[in-house]
Structure formats: structure tokens, C-alpha cells
Image (cartoon, coloured by chain):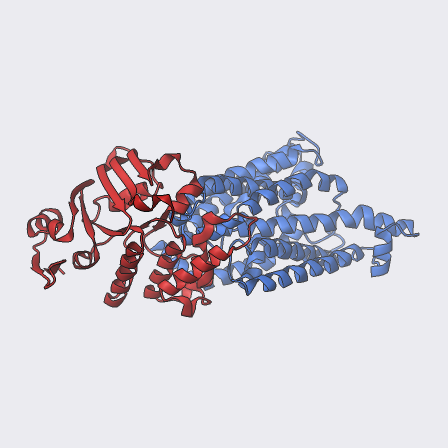
Chain colours: A blue, B red
Amino acid sequence: MTRAEPTGLRLNLALAALILVLAVVSLMVGPAGLSPREALTGLFGGDDPAAAIVVRDIRLPRTLLAILIGATFGLSGAALQGLLRNPLAEPALFGAPQAASVGASFVIAYGIAGATSFAVPVAGIVGALVSIGGLVAIAGRRASLSVTLLAGLALASLAGAATALILNLAPTPYAALEIAFWLLGSLEDRSMDHLMIAAPFFVASWVLLTMNARAFRALTLGEDAAASLGVDIARTRLLVVIGVALGVGASVAVAGSIGFIGLVAPHLVRRSVNSDPARVCLPAALMGAALLTAADIAVRLVPANPNATAIEIKLGVVTAIIGVPFFLAMIFRERQLIDGASS
Amino acid sequence: MNAKVNNKLKLHAGAVVVRFGDALIVDGAALDLAAGELTVLIGPNGAGKTTLMRALAGLVPAEGRIDIEGKPLASLTVRERARRIAYLPQGHVFHWPMPVAAVVALGRYAYGDAFSAVTDDDRRAVAKALAATGTESFAARAVTTLSGGERARVALARALACEAPILLADEPTVSLDPRHQLVVMQLLARAAHDGGAVLAIGHDLALAARFADRIVMMDRGRLVADGAPRDVLTVERIAAVFGVEAFIADDVTGRHPVLLRPL
């Protein structure tokens, strides 16, 4: 028990340092390349006004958003895995970002609100709440892996169909195109307004999820034993569902659909904390932040076709391309568990 | 431990009724658990044993009266309840490959919160539970890598680490080899004789006859017998409740009946 504590601390410090380095790189990379010194002087108001504008108004918001969204997904993944006692649990596999997309794209398509109003995150949060609430209700007490995955698949498909319907019925082709690109997930051209809209929801989500970290540890014994130890299962479930929905809904509202960070991040750090589902929360959040910041740097380094409609590769595309093979590898590793659960 | 020392009655249940929808699962059960006594609850599959135990643990809503150390179960906070009743469910499930010592330390859950550090009391209780169950030699191993017998002992150690006056164990010997069945029953008997009020569900009548201070027999939701093993385990009653023919001998000391059949 005591041996894990310094390792966890060292891991967290190392990840925090990695995030700092990545954040500086993220401020340097883009159409106008900057040296680390230029980026930092730009950030703290140096003498080059052009560099200051590029760093502070263009790159700082997207860097901060990458860190906050990545942390939110990493923590959400760790929390859902702890709640459902299942290493494959992840917001995207339950259709949460997809359902959030339905809510948010509906608001965008019908021009109910501008892209930087609170209506978009609220619509996204409602969508995520419905999907995760539905999943936890279906997968419920037994937490069988096959039931959970199948229910998640069904919810994700339904959300996909609903989004397709909105695209289908979009009032103008322009609105349809805007939604389509936004759905791919990106942090391009995000401003401090986006950050300010989403930040309160992120903070609320973190508070709700970390509040329940101890309960995740007790849940390793199953729901009955955890309840006998004093865990209020219904309350834990409700708070986690709301916490994930707030974080994922707000993320999707400002950055579109970004998947798999919640699956990958906790897995990469789990062994360093002896698989403790409570202690994994902080490093999972930090790892998520590092991964998404790195992915957001990668999309700026990979040259996109200059004639294409999109200037950059979309972030959601990159996380999915990395995440899906990872997910498949995990399914093969856990297939005993899946076979056992379905029998 | 305190003024309650002379009050040996730890759990008192009267007219407990549990329904799932229209189905009556527990039908007016009355049961007392006293400190220092190992009580074994037996009965055929589907008799309602697990549901009764979960009701006593406060995990399913029940009608009737359940008192824990003289106070109504419903009046206790979740944390107060968790400090008084340790519950060991069936199956000995561990979902994450956590080290054994960390799993056993979960028994101390109700003694801390998110902001409190591990106390000396916690360390002592965990060390004691590990030592009692002989699990300290693999305390650092991941619990998912253990054999069935080892897992059963770890699960029991977790429950013992609660240091609750009442221990409820649902089929603690299921799927264990004969030696580990004996080990687990000895541990439960020791927990009782150290002052705990222990209730265990079992299917092995011979094992129950050998270790129980008291046997409670349940059939179709009702408690049909409650008393010393030699009084409860009769050929007629076993035939009526379990539908099997028993053959019972007396051991030389005369304390426990010895079942030569059905098992």
C-alpha cells in the first residue's frame, strides 16, 4: 500500500512536467513557427506584437482547451471504469460524445444560438446525460461487460442516426457542412470565449467525479459489498453520470466529437498505481491532458491538402485513428472477461 | 469493548418480510444473533437465505423489526451501519488486480473519508486480519492472481478488517476444496469465539453440524427450525426440507451430530 504512494506522486509530477513541455510546444507550432523563447515572450507580452497576438489569441486558447478537455476525458474514463468495474468503459463507447453532438448540432443547425453561447454546451450536456444515464440504467447492477458494450453500441448508433437526421434536414447546405466538420472534432480557431463557456462545466465535472474516487475503490468488491461498507451506490451512480455528462457535453460543445482519450489515458497509468481505481483518477486526467495536447500538436504538423476544405487534419480523426487499434488490442487482452461475461 | 459488554444480543430481527414485486421472498423471519456465537443458516436453493441476510445487512428494504445493538437498523446512518455489520457476499469478487493488502484495507472504509489519512487503528486491524487468515505472505500480490482458496481467505480478511460486532457471510465456503472449507469455517468459529456475532450461510450440512453453535433452517421464505445442531438436524426435518435421506451418528463427545449422509 505504502509503496505505491511515492510512485504515484512521481508519476503525477512527471506527467505535469510533460504537460508543461507540450504546452510550450503547442504555443510554438503552427503556420507561423516560433522558437520556445519567442513563444514564451509572446505569452508574457514581449516586444513583438505579432507573436503576442498569435500566441495569446490563437494558440493559448487551443492549448488550454486541449489540456482541460484531455483531462476531462481522462478523468471521465477513469470514473466510468471505476463505477462499472470495467476497463473498457469510456464516454465514447457509451455514445456520450455522440449524444452530446446530437444536442449541440441541433442547436447549431437551427441557429437557435451562436456557437459561443451557453446554449450549445447545455444542449450537449443534456444529450450526454441522456446517453450515460440510459447506459447506467441498462447495464445497472450486474455490470456485465457484454451487456454494457452492447447497450453502449446501441446508444451510439442511435445518436449517430439522430445526428445524420439533423444533417439530412439541415436548413441550409452551409449549416450541414459546418456541423459535419465540427463533428470531426477540432480545436482550430477556438477563442478565450470558448474556454470561458466550457471551463465552469469542466470544474463542476472534476469535483463531482473526484468526490466519488473512494467509492470506486470500494466498488472493486462489487456493489453489495461496497454498499455494506457504506457506499451509497445510487448517489455515486447519479453523481458520476452527471459529472461525465457535464464534462463530455461541454467538451463536445466547444471541440466537437473527440473519442478514446478516456479509454487510453487510464489504461496507460493504471499499473503505476497498482490498479487502484481511486488513485488512478489524477494520473489519468494528467495523461489525458498530455495525450490530447500532443494530438493537437500532431494535427498541426501533418500537412493537409491545401485545396481541401479543411486546413488541418481534424483532432477527433487523429484520436480515433490511434484509439481504435488500442481498443481492439484491449478487447483481445480482456477477451477472457468478455467471454466469461457473455456465458 | 465498553458498557455493552454484558449485552450479548447484537442483532434482533422480528417478523422480517421481504417482497420483490408480488413475490414473498422472506416470510416473517425472527432471528437473534448473540456475541460469541457462530450461527449457520441452511436451507435449499431459493429458500430466501441470501435475501434474508441482505435484509439484515440493510441492503434490501424489509418490513418488520431489525435492531442492531438495540437500535433500529433504519435509524443508523450508512456509516454507523457499516461499522457494526460486516457483510461478505457470495462469490468473492475482485474486479481490479489490486494488491491483497489494499483490498483488505477496504474493510476500513467506514472509518475514514476522502481527506483522512490511514490511522494506526486501520493498520493494526488490517495486519490482524491478514495474520488471522494467513494471507500476509501474499499481501503484496495482485488479488486476481490468487487461487480460489486464497481469494476466499482474502475476502474474509476484508470482512474481518471491518472489526464489526456482527459478521454476515453468504456461502463463504462455496467452491472451496475440503481443506479450505475447514479453514474458513475455523476462521468464522474463531471470529465468533473472539466475541463476534457471526451468521454464515452454508450448504454443507455436515460442515454446519460440525462448526455451528446454532443452526437456523430456512424453507420457502420461513425459518422452520432454530437451535443447537443436534436438535435442528433430524432425519425427519432434513427429509422434509431438503428431500434427501440423511443418516446421522453421534460423535463421541456428544456435542455435535455427525452426518454420514447425504454428503
Residue A192 shows in the view: yes
Q: Is A37 on the left or on the right of B236, as rendered? A: right
Q: Residue at x 19, y 56 (%)?
A: B208
Residue A188 shows in the view: no
Q: How many marks?
A: 0
The vertical placement of A214 against A168, above or below, is: below
Query: Where does the image place residue A62, in percent across and percent down from the top left?
Result: 73, 49
Q: Residue at x 6, y 49 (%)?
A: B236
Q: Quadrant of the C terminus of chain A?
A: bottom left
Farthest bottom residue in view: B137
**Quarter-of-image position of residue A323:** bottom right
The vertical placement of B51 against A300, above or below, is: above
Which of A112 and B109 lies nearest the eye of the viewer?
Answer: B109
Q: Residue at x 7, y 52 (%)?
A: B235
Query: Where does the image place residue B116, in percent across and percent down from the top left?
Result: 55, 50
Which of B87 and A287 lies nearest the eye of the viewer?
Answer: B87
Farthest top residue in view: A112
**Quarter-of-image position of residue A302:** bottom right
Q: Is A62 on the left or on the right of A170, as rendered? A: right
Which of B222 and A76 lies nearest the eye of the viewer?
Answer: B222
Farthest right residue in view: A47
Query: Where does the image place residue B167, in percent across and percent down from the top left?
Result: 33, 50
Query: Where does the image place residue B244, in percent across and percent down from the top left?
Result: 10, 53
The vertical placement of A206 against B144, above or below, is: above
Q: Is A18 on the left or on the right of B219, as rendered? A: right
